Amino acid sequence: QITPIGRRAMQLPASARLSRLLLAAEASGKEVLEDAVDLVAGLSGRRLFLPTRTETSEAREAWDAHRCDATALILALRFGVASRDALHSAALIEARRVVRQLRACFGLRGEAKATRVDRRALGDAMLNADPKAAFVRRKRRDVFTNEGSEIVLPRETRLKDDVDALVLFDVRTIKDRNRLLNLATCATPAVLPQFAHIGLGTVKVTKTSIVR
């Protein structure tokens, strides 16, 4: 039997996983929902960002400076100009069409204008929708795991090299020589207490000291 949440998810123009993200974001408030709507729209079609071989625009540099794939995608969708920011023109048009569809589904009027994305709240919504989106870095520094699967960061990732945990929004599988490789094509950095906060794992005291 389909649950009420499942019935609502079926009515959204998105995959089952991303639909659950939207419903979790809705429970977190309008601002988080607007961020999730734009993110889901950006992930629902062709890749938005084109590779750049020369200098990038100031806008794209500013998006990349957030060190978060999700934030960059959301801001590019809201404020990007295809010719200026090296964005796929048809993908941008299609994603903005999906935004309008999703906003109508949730009764959101107008367009999102916020220049700040609450990536912590967005990450929490994704974890509530799918706890398997929580990944931590293994001792092999280039690999992240959720104890069920492994992913690696692609060369074009915006995350810093020293990030130890992330929330995964989108993954792409490619064949690398004789093995399949899962690339984290859209992720946001996280901290381990964030996972414990929503019930993933526990906080453990490993060392104590006395301060005199």
Image (spheres, rainbow, N blue to C red):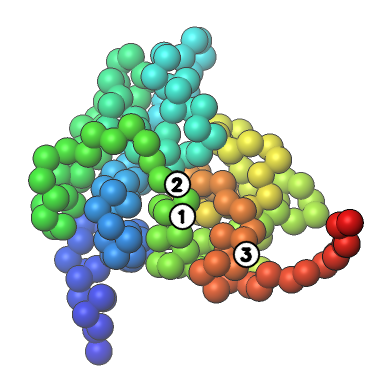
Which x, y percent locates residue 177?
68, 45
Which x, y percent locates residue 44?
31, 48
Mark 3 surroundings: few (<14), some (14-19) or many (≥20) residues within 10 A: some
Residue tagged by mark 2?
119
Position of the C terminus by quadrant: bottom right
Amino acid marked by disc 1: Gly
Residue 146 has which mark? 3
Amino acid marked by disc 2: Arg
User: Label 1 near label 2: C-beta < 8 Å?
Assistant: yes
Tag 1, which secondary structure?
helix
Residue tagged by mark 1?
123
Q: Nearer the viewer, mark 1 or mark 3?
A: 1
Q: For residue 134, say whether it is visible.
A: yes
Q: Is residue 150 above or below residue 100?
A: below
Q: Earlier in the sequence, mark 1 or mark 3?
A: 1
Tag 3, which secondary structure?
loop
